[in-house]
Image (cartoon, helix red, strand yellow):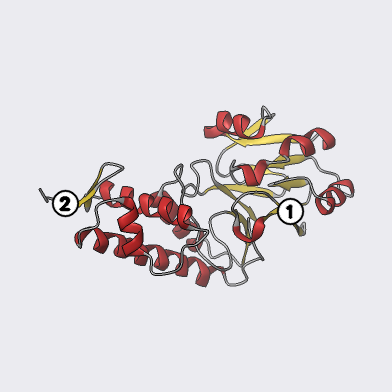
Amino acid sequence: MSTVERVRVPVSGSVPGGATNAYLVGNVLVDPAARSAALDALVAGADIAHVACTHTHPDHVGALAQYATETDATVWAHAPHADRFERASGVAPDRTFREGDAIGPLVALATPGHAPDHVAFAHGDGYLVGDCCRADGSVAIGTDGDMRAYLTSLRRLHARAPERLYPGHGPPIAAPGERLAALVAHRRERESRVLRAVEAGARTLDAVVDAAYDADLTGVREQATATASAHLEKLAVEGRVEWDGSRATPVGSD
């Protein structure tokens, strides 16, 4: 089986650890986030036939166009979101894939939530999971995310009993079942805090964040705010709160 080679690529913007992991698995380059000397060297020494990404956030596709051109590789996009891929990467995909399709030694699994186009790639009993999870800390669900879909994706990954996870940020995860279960539990606890905040009188998003988070949010308040909003949207869909995007109220309140 092909080895999984990881290169930590420094990127601009607010990302965990200031870097995104690019991976080379067999002849497939995944998530070429930016140009770096280390990634240049890895690409130069490989016979790359395919380029793909776990999702199209800028810190995962920043150098995709350049490496695809230099390697003359086939560029793949998640079929339901090919237009989004082209807008984000600046490249029209050569081919598209859906869940269950193979790209070289990798097999795609749809894992929406952090982003609508998010996928993981199975490699034997290991998975390249992008921003589904990381070894420590939680994952922000931004304005284009969906908390219900994210929790479903975590549970789907857990059900597959992977032996190793290769995240988009930070080191590999050697105890995937434990980590995935912890992330689901963390999201459920945060959801409970958000619900209690609304029931206790928090009406604005800022008020909900202040009540639902007891940690210092310096430098990460924007991510916490987006994630709290995603929790409110989930609770609203489930009929547990009323939320119009600016004001939250308990169900049935005047």
The x, y position of residue 48, in whole percent, is: 81, 43
Residue at (84% x, 51% y) in the render: 37
Q: Vertically, is 218 above or below 120?
A: below
Q: Which sits in the foreground, 129 or 123?
A: 129
The x, y position of residue 116, in whole percent, is: 48, 42
Residue at (40% x, 51% y) in the render: 147
Which residue is the extreme one toward the front? 218
Residue at (20% x, 63% y) in the render: 200
- Look at label 1 and name its amino acid: Val
Q: Which sits in the foreground, 240 or 221?
A: 221
Q: What element carries label 1?
A: strand
Dot 2 corresponds to which residue? 251
Q: Is mark 2 on a helix, strand or loop?
A: loop
| Number of marks present in the image shown | 2
Dot 1 corresponds to which residue? 9
Q: Can residue 53 be seen in this view?
A: no
